[in-house]
Amino acid sequence: MENNNHTMHANPFAGTGKVFSYSFRQMLKSKGWLITTLLMAGILLIGIPLVTLCVTKLASKEETEADESAVSTVYIADETAGKADYNVLKDTGDYTDVEYIPCDSMDAAVEAAAGDAGAVILRVTKPEDVYALTVYLTEDTEVSRSKASSFASFAESNFSALLMQKANLTAEETALLSMKVRSETTAVSPDAEEKDAEDSLVKQILEVFIPFMTVMMVYMMVILYGQAMANSVMLEKTSKLMETILTAVHPVALMTGKLLATACAAVFQIGIWMVAAVGGMIGSAIAALPMIMKSMNEGTAAAANMPDADKMAAVTEMLGDSFPAISVSGIFLTLVVMALGFLLYLAVATVSGAMASKQEDMNKTLTIFVLTLLISLMLCFNPEINEVSESFSLISDAKWLRFFPFTGMLVLPADLIFGKLAGWEIALALLSFVAAVLLLVWLAAAVYKLLVLYRGNPPKLRQLIGMLRPKKDGKSGS
């Protein structure tokens, strides 16, 4: 036994693989893990497309009902000077199915519209120095007042095209006056290089949404699996074979194996959920595709004339432009940071579990784990508005939070995704993570070995430090 103990002290990680393999299999076989995994995966895989399908069906039904009361015919009573072809309004891409019928007078328009359920009358007058557009609802029409008001707004916003015809402008003059104008706001840096002062709206939304979601996702992962880790360590101490286990495996190997097994089971579970979520999103996109294609057909004349393949390419390009600042390498580093951070908090939970001797003690010892997580979370949140870019941020920009392990794993993922950190900053943060994980694993093993046969109230922090402090003869206090 002396030789065995000597070997374990020489290589404290010996046997980690066996502990990991056994613990990992036990976790995957547990009913709680299987039920939770399959239930959530089913909800994501089936629920997301189902909700999208219901929404699209409801929207299609509402759209069909709306189309039944839409404007189909417009009788024109133009009482102003000059001639204009109102069919030019179809070139705008809206109300392309509307039929425009000119009438000599208002009375003629009322007579022509009689019996037409989709008809309205557009009367154009010029009482003074302004053109007045009035939309009339006939007695027989089924067009709602809101639909008529929408058409009136459309006619008003595009009336300039009719005025150009009334002014007898040439085709070049009409094209010049119809030319679109684009404006943007930029800033000039001190070195005279022009740069954008404002990010796109999509990017601003992502820079608020992604940090918040990563912080909350990591928080939920730690809360969910941290308590399970602490319970696993505490229950291991009550096993009748504990003394035999400790003579065969070093506490460091035991804690490391259980830590890695819990982390891998968690990652495996979340991986299944992510695959199910991706499948659900693909199913959701397929369910929503008919509505997207229909919207493109009814959007502009240019989109309506596009082949289906070009429409799909346009949708893909639109989705791609929504993530302009996200890098693939950043996503990979984010996964590494989240894995190390997850191990870090599981190591804290391992220390909490090692301090407890029975289930009743867990509420006391888990305080260390919960307070560490909550304080770190509170330090990360700092809602503020950047006065320069006028952008809003939920997560603090303090640099030291990126290098402190307990807060770094919460705030670093978003920074890495958007590529905001230099190489040396990433290396320093990862190094601090690895060092903190190894230190906490060693601490958990030391506490576990020290208190494995302890059967009293959990020691306070000061007492625990005193027990861990080596005595003059080289042995730990007990």
Image (cartoon, rainbow, N blue to C red):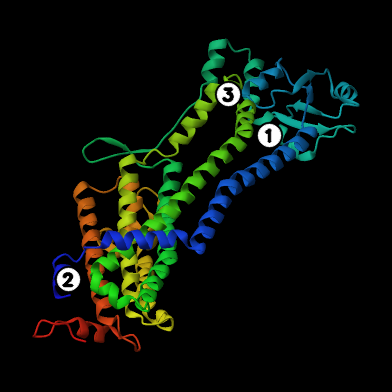
What's the residue at 37%, 58% (across, down)? 395
Q: Distance between the residues labelled 2 and 1?
A: 88 Å
Q: Is residue 396 visible?
A: no
Residue 4, disc: 2
Give the labeled residue for mark 1: 153
Q: In which quarter of the image is the C terminus?
A: bottom left
Residue 41 appears at what percent x and percent y?
A: 53, 51
Q: Of the residues under marks 2 and 1, which one precedes in the sequence?
A: 2
Residue 303, disc: 3
Position above or below: 461 against 145: below
Residue at the far left in the pictured view: 472
Circle 2 Cα neighbour tier, 10 Å, few/some/many (<14 / 14–19 / ≥20): few
Q: For mark 1, give the secondary structure.
A: helix
Amino acid identity at mark 1: Ser
Residue 474 shown left or right of residue 135 in the figure: left
Q: Are marks 1 and 3 in contact (CB under 8 Å)?
A: no
In the depicted view, which residue is nearer to us: 292 or 244? 244
